[in-house]
Image: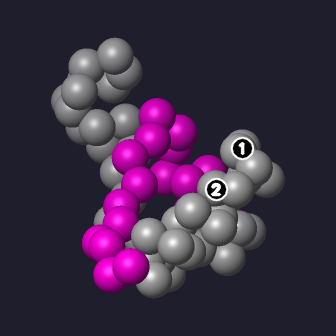
Amino acid sequence: MVAFDGAVAGVERLAAAGLRLGVASSSNRPLIETVLEHAGIAARSETTVSSEEVGRGKPAPDV
C-alpha cells in the first residue's frame, strides 16, 4: 500500500536518526491513517495534515 519502494525504510532511518517526522498529504485523513498503519509507521509521525483540513489545497502551500 506504500507508493514508493524504500519509503518505509527511509522513514525508519530518519526516525532512528532522531528526526521529528510528520506527514502532509492531499489525501483525506482516513486514508492517511490507513496507509501509515498498514505500513507500520504510524507511530513515527508526530503529526499529519490533510489538504481537507486547511484553507487551500494543492497547489497552494497550505498543507
Question: Can you give x and y, in whole percent of width and height, for residue 7 in the image?
Answer: 64, 56
Task: Judge whether residue 21 is colored magenta.
Answer: yes
Report the number of discs. 2
Quick check: 61 above or below 29?
above
Task: Judge whether residue 29 is colored magenta.
Answer: yes
Q: Which amino acid does label 1 sit on?
A: Ala
Q: Quadrant of residue 34?
A: bottom right
**Residue pointed to by mark 1:** 3
Question: Can you give x and y, in whole percent of width and height, for residue 49 in the image?
Answer: 35, 51
User: Would you say residue 52 is visible in this rendering?
Assistant: no
Mark number displayed over residue 7: 2
Tell me where the magenta segment starts and ends, as one range: 17-34
Q: Which label sits in the foreground, 2 or 1? A: 2
Q: Which amino acid does label 2 sit on?
A: Ala
- At 72% across and 44% down in the image, what residue appears? 3
Image position of 37 (left or right of 60): right
Mark number displayed over residue 29: none
